[in-house]
Image (cartoon, rainbow, N blue to C red):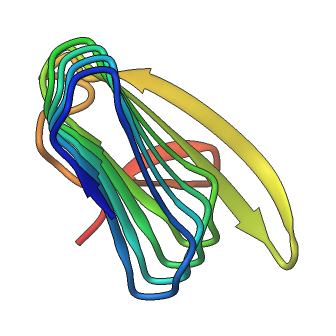
Amino acid sequence: ASNIGFYSAASNTGAYSTASNIGFYSAASNTGAYSAASNTGNYSVATNTGYYSVASVSGKHSIAVNTGHKGKVKGALGCWIACAEWRWNAIVNFKSAYVDGKKIKADTWYRLEDGKFVEAN
């Protein structure tokens, strides 16, 4: 699913799928395993809940959220990232961080491990 319009949404529920958006103030969401949600518009959100999935944002003042098992997130400088950490079949940690370019690097994949953001391939 993809969208280019302002104030728009793109969503998908299939495994190995992608939801992407370019519009400002928009949302891209995905629930499929091994899937991707991405957004390039300012003030936008990319969310993903699928196992081994990713969420990324590159627009200013945006947020990438992933609650999927073994999920990854990344954001541009000035954005926020948020990720869940799973053990067995339950979420044990959830954390958000501001992409400041120092503690959290821009355009770098992160996952949550032992309650801390760590760089991920």
**Residue with the most extreme front position:** 5
Q: Nearer the viewer, residue 110 or 103?
A: 110
Q: Is residue 60 above or below residue 72?
A: above
User: Would residue 49 appear left or right of 28 to someone viewing this image?
Assistant: right
Give coordinates of residue 105: x percent, y percent: 16, 34
Q: Nearer the viewer, residue 20 or 95?
A: 20
The residue at 55%/72% (across/down) is: 70
Q: Is residue 98 above or below residue 112?
A: above
Rendered-image quadrant of the N terminus: bottom left
User: Would residue 26 appear left or right of 11 to someone viewing this image?
Assistant: left
User: Would residue 87 appear left or right of 25 to someone viewing this image?
Assistant: right
The residue at 16%/15% (across/down) is: 60
Give coordinates of residue 113: x percent, y percent: 55, 57
The residue at 79%/70% (across/down) is: 87
The residue at 44%/83% (across/down) is: 34
Give coordinates of residue 116: x percent, y percent: 52, 42
Among the 4 quarters of the image, the one containing residue 62: top left
Rendered-image quadrant of the C terminus: bottom left
Among the 4 quarters of the image, the one containing residue 83: top right
Q: Is residue 105 above or below residue 111?
A: above
Give coordinates of residue 66: x percent, y percent: 53, 51
